[in-house]
Image: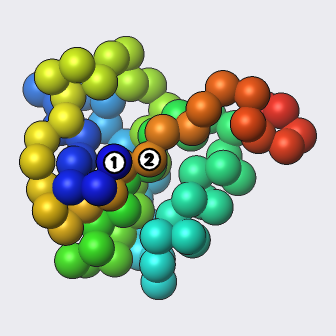
Amino acid sequence: MTGWQLSCANTTCLPFATTTVLNIRICQTACLNQAKCKTATFHQSSSTCDLFSNIPSLNGSLVADMSSVTMLVMAGTRIPPG
């Protein structure tokens, strides 16, 4: 979802990892390599990647940010399944 980032009012959806990456593909790979990763946000302006494991609902958790891309892991798409 281009132009959106996660923003939560509580601590249950803080990223479990934040890393500096060269591009969005590395951010995607970082998330898919972690079995507990369910959502990743790539910040283009700072080249950082936030990995999230516990996002109860995206309703009300997304805010507009044109320099961010949020990606969701779809169930059943990991090989091997996590």
For this orientation, the residue located farthest to the bottom is: 22
Classify residue 58 as left or right of residue 60.
Answer: right
Q: Residues within 10 Å of mark 2 (few under 14, many from 20)?
A: many
Label 1 is placed on what type of residue? Met
Where does residue 77 sit, x and y in percent of width and height?
A: 73, 36
Q: Indicate whether 76 appears above or below 79.
A: above
Q: CA distance from mark 1 to mark 2?
A: 6 Å
Q: Residues within 10 Å of mark 1 (few under 14, many from 20)?
A: few
Where does residue 13 sit, x and y in percent of width and height?
A: 32, 29
What SS does tag 1 mark?
A: loop
Is there any visible trace of residue 10 in the rendered image? no
Residue 80 occupies quadrant: top right
Label 2 is placed on what type of residue? Met
N-terminal of the pair, mark 1 or mark 2, is: 1
Residue annotated with mark 1: 1
The answer to whether the residue labelled 1 contacts the one labelled 2, judged by CB atoms less than 8 Å apart, is: yes
Residue 65 occupies quadrant: bottom left
Q: Residue at x 28, y 74 (%)?
A: 44
Q: Indicate whether 68 appears above or below 58.
A: below
Where does residue 50 sit, x and y in percent of width and height?
A: 38, 54
Q: Indicate whether 22 appears above or below 61.
A: below
Where does residue 21 sit, x and y in percent of width and height?
A: 46, 77
Q: Residue at x 66, y 50 (%)?
A: 32
Front position in the image: 18 or 27? 27
Residue annotated with mark 2: 71
Label ID, residue 21: none
Quadrant that contains the C terminus: top right
